[in-house]
Every structure is written in C-alpha cells, then in structure tokens.
Amino acid sequence: MDSVELVFMALESSNLDPAIIAKHSNAIGEVSTFLNCSEEEAIAFCLLIQLYYNRTRPSINEIIKHLEAKPSVSHNLNEWLAPFVSKKWIRPKINPNNNPLTEYAISDEIIQAVNTGKWSHMNREEINNQVDLIIQFNKLISSRNRDLLTYAELVKESADLVKSNNEIPISEIILDNSNDDETIMLALKICALKINSEEISETNIIDSLKPDYRARIMMVSSLKNNTNSLITSNFISLKTNRHFYNESEFDLCDKVLGTIGTLDQNFELTSFKSLQKILPENITKKVLQFNSTEEAIMFKMFDLVKEKNFKTFCKRMTGIKMKPGVTILLHGYPGTGKTESVLQMAKKSGRIILKADVSSIRNKYVGDTEKSIRELFVDYKKACKHYKKIPILLFNEADSILTTRRSVERGIDQMENTMQNIILEELENFEGIFVATTNMELNLDKAFDRRFLYKVKMQKPSSKTRMGIWKSKFKTFSDSILQELSENYELSGGQIDNVAKKIEVDFLLNGSVAKDIGYLKGVIKSETSLDSANNHRVIGFRITNQ
C-alpha cells in the first residue's frame, strides 16, 4: 500500500506533531480502514512496517529515531501496536514491559496482505488432506523460528491444528498415540520430517521447535532413554545410533505408515494417471427431478454418503466384521441423470470424485490392461488415506467392463474376462464409495449384480417429472404450453437440457425467441430426429461376435 510509505515519510522528524498528522489524515485514514483500527494504531503500524521494508530493524527504538521523539513516547507506540500483537500479525521479541524499545517480528501473512492490498493471504488455508496439514504445521514452525510464537503457543496451536482436523488419517493416528499437547506437536513434527524426506533425528526433531531449556532437556532425555510415549506406544522406533556423538535416529513404525499411507507432497502429481479429479466446489448445484419409483432410494443414497452418516455406517460395518463399502449401480436410458446424480451426491456431501477413464484402462498390449485396473484401485486406496473425506470412485459409462463375461475364443476375450475378474475381486473387498453408470439394461454379469449394494434403474421421466424439469428450465413459458409438452413428448432430462440450450442459441443469435407451442415443437423435433422408437439407426459400425 502506497499510503504506508507516505505516512512513514510524512512523519519523519515530526515528533508526532498533530498538525502534520492532520495534514496527512487521508493516507492515515486509508490504512486505518484497511486494518480496521484507530488512526493512532495505523500510524504505529505504518512506522513499523516501513522500517521492515527499508531493511532497518523494526523496533520501537528505530521508530523513535525516525520521529526524533523522546523515549517516553515508547509507551504509546507499544500500546498502539498491542492490537496487532493480539491478532498475531506482529510479536515483540522482548516483553515491552521489560524493554519498551523492543524489536518486533512481523508475520509473512501481514506483509503479503500489505503488498497486495488484500486480506485473502490472512485466511488460514482450508485443510483437505494430510499434506495440507503438514504444510500448515510447517508455517507454525516458521513463525516459531522467527519468534512470532512462543514455545507454549506453538504447542497449543499445533495440537489445535491436529484436533480440529481429526478426520484426516494422520491426525487420527497422532491423537491415538499422544497423551498431551506437546506429544501431539512432537508426533506432527516427526511426520513432517518424513514427508520432507529428512532424517528423524534428535536434532531435526527438536531444533526447529525451539523448546525452552526445561522442555528441551526432558525431550532429549526421553528420546535417549526410550521412555518417550511415542516410542512406548510404537509410533516411532529406534533406527540407529550411527552418529559419532551418539545421536539417535528414528523411523515411523509400520502401523503408522500403514495408517498414513503416502506422505508424498507430489502425491497428486504422481498418482491418479487414469483418474480425473472433480472437486465438489467446481460442481454446479442443481435440483434433480426423479420419478416416484426412484426418488426414495436416490435420496437414501444421498443421505448415506453425508459425512456423519457414512462414518457411522463404516463404524457399524467394521463392528460386525463387514467391509465398510458402498457400491452403487445407476443404469437405464441415456440422459436420465445418472452422471448428474453422482455429481450432486458429491456436491451435497462435499466429496471429491475420482472418475475412471475406462478408455485409458484398456491397452492393446497383453497384461497392461490388467496392470492399469489394479493400479487404479491402488490409487483410490491411497486417496482414501490422503483426503479428509473418502472420495467417490466413479466408473462412468461402464458398459464395456460390466457386461457378461465371454467364452474365450480370442485373445481379447481372455483379456476382457481377466479385467472383469479383477474388478469383481476389488469390489468384493471394497472400502469406500463406488458408483458405476451404464446405459445397458439386461446385459449385466450376474457376478456384478451381487457386488452392488444399490442398483437403481433410471427410467425416462414420467409426465409429472417432465413437467417439473420443463418448469425449471423455461420459467418464461406458460404452464399450459409446458403441460402439453410434458404429456406429448417422452423426452429424457438430458434431451430437455439440449432443447434449453438450443433455445438459448436462438436467443443469442436472433435477440428473441417465439414463446409459442409451434416454435418449441420445432426445436423438439430437431432434438428427437435420431430417437425414433421404431426406426433407430446405429451410426458407425455394428460389431457382432462371430
């Protein structure tokens, strides 16, 4: 912000003269508004921050020199800066009561906010997975190393970070093996070293935490004597005493590594080669219209995958020795909302969708298809440990991999059957949320039928349901026109969507559209030209088994 520098320059050698302050009230007011503080607090803030920018020690002593004021003004300056200390934007390196001329440490976040003139940098980033958690913890460590946090504050904030994100696997295992806040922080630091591929040594564990003298002695002693609770609970184990000064090195125990899964910061770059990630915030919220025969079961599934219900479901299934997996098959006529239902399911439950690209799974080389399908499920299992909420694994338009297995007459038949057998095996032991969509009606392999907890046939909307869809798309058309369309044209929801798009195109190109039944019938005719019930031509090649 230019106003910060302007205020700093204006007050040079001013001794805080009220006349000079009044002369530059606009610039001071701009900073005051930005910070939501008083004018006196804004003045102290400008003086401190600009010293930092000038690469001068940001201290009360330097501010007094700049103002050419008496040392007694230090009390006022510290008092004006106090609100920013309470917000943890700045921190005195020595208690102002003991040293009124103290230097202040300034957080990176407030510097970025001043640089950009935006507060977006000041908001704590949302934590969706364990990598996000470690990144946020590393920021706390950075603040501690720059004296923005005391050791006690670091302990508390680290513990609060883990406790407030207790659904993430790394948090769960830390809380299960920690009996106090300091142990939680220590466990989180050890995991951070692992994710950064650093040695888990006494020095690396302790130094960046900057514990006070007593805490350091007790921490070192418990690690050397193997009495630390993280050792006795098998969170970490002694690896070696290889250092010449007898410093111990540790590693995470198998149970921790197994629970945490991958700790690779590049996880999302190296995984999901055949999975497309769809974030819930990128999904447009829509109100779905279902037939009465589908509505109850669809809403039941929507409720089941809500986080609270799904966690309870998983706990109950585990308690009775059953796999905590929800497997869903949505099948039926094209354009009836199968894929959109999965999207809205993810939107409502706040879950990420991992969409399998069925075409990329298949490979002309023998063995590669089987390898791809196994890697896909391995990636999904990693993702379940990586993300805060269990993601939805979606096999969209999965007709080709859910069909009845073939008698083996050609090499490709064997490959298809092997791929299906792998999927059957994975679904038998599946943990998570799996949804497959298909347009086929009766060609589902019987072995797959048993693997799906819910099987929903999505039929063309009834006249009543079509009326609801028409009204949601065409609010400016009369009910009588829409009722006639609903009763006389058996369109799917997808087809009605296309009609709406075509009308939007006409409006864009012509500036208006006719709001009469004749115009709408013409658009519908163009939409259904390839959808004659009795004379359906297949475009492309028809493949038959010889």
Image (tube, rainbow, N blue to C red):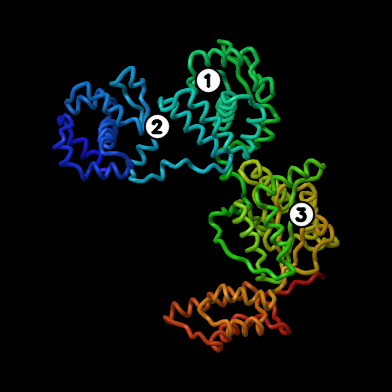
Name the amino acid, label 3: Met
Could you say whether the residue bearing mark 1 is in a helix, strand or loop? helix
Q: Which residue is mark 2?
A: 86
Q: CA distance from mark 3 to mark 2?
A: 60 Å
Q: Could you tell me which residue is drawn at 16 percent across and 29 percent down?
A: 15
Query: What is the x, y in percent for residue 23?
Result: 15, 41
User: Which of the numbered marks, if any, corresponds to residue 419?
Assistant: 3
Q: Is residue 278 above or below residue 180?
A: below
Viewer-closest of 340 and 30: 30
At label 1, counting other C-alpha atoms closer than 10 Å, the crowd grade (few under 14, some 14-19, many 20 or more) is some
Q: Could you tell me which residue is drawn at 37 percent across and 37 percent down?
A: 110
- Tell me if 489 is positioned left or right of 452 in this view: left
At label 2, counting other C-alpha atoms closer than 10 Å, the crowd grade (few under 14, some 14-19, many 20 or more) is few
Could you say whether the residue bearing mark 3 is in a helix, strand or loop? helix
Name the amino acid, label 1: Ile
Query: What is the x, y in percent for residue 456?
Result: 75, 64
